Image (tube, helix red, strand yellow):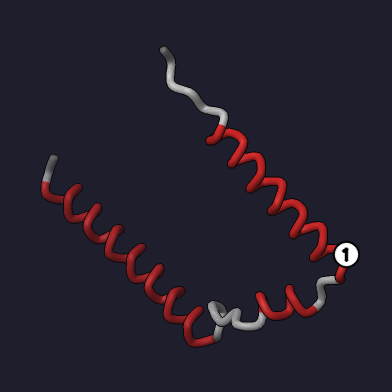
Amino acid sequence: MSAWVVAMMLGVSTLLGAIGLGFLLWGLKTGQFEDEDKFLNGARYDGVEELRDAVMMEEKKKKAINKKTSSYRPPD
């Protein structure tokens, strides 16, 4: 490769990195990554029925996993 191609690739990659860093700093400054209330609002506005369904689904998953692991036998 010639020197100007390497220089062009370095210049473009540096420019793209600077643009990405600029957007990251902008996101941090404007609070784009602050999502502290998401989990609390999700739990706060769930109804009792949805929570019961979620618990039942978790129990079914655990039973299925236990069933798979307990019924395994190595070949003779």
**Residue 40 position in % (x across, y down):** 69, 80
Q: In this orientation, which residue lies closer to the viewer: 9 or 31? A: 31
Q: Where the N terminus falls, by quadrant?
A: top left
Looking at the image, which residue sits at the far bottom? 29
Above or below: residue 76 compared with residue 14 = above
Label 1 secondary element? helix
**Which residue appears at 24% of the width and 52% of the height?**
9
Residue type at the position of mark 1: Glu
- Please indicate whether residue 15 sits to the left or right of residue 28 in the image: left
**Residue 53 position in % (x across, y down):** 81, 57
Q: Quadrant of residue 55?
A: bottom right
Q: Quadrant of residue 10?
A: bottom left
Q: Which residue is mark 1?
A: 49
Above or below: residue 32 compared with residue 60 = below
Query: How many discs appear?
Result: 1
**Residue 34 position in % (x across, y down):** 56, 82
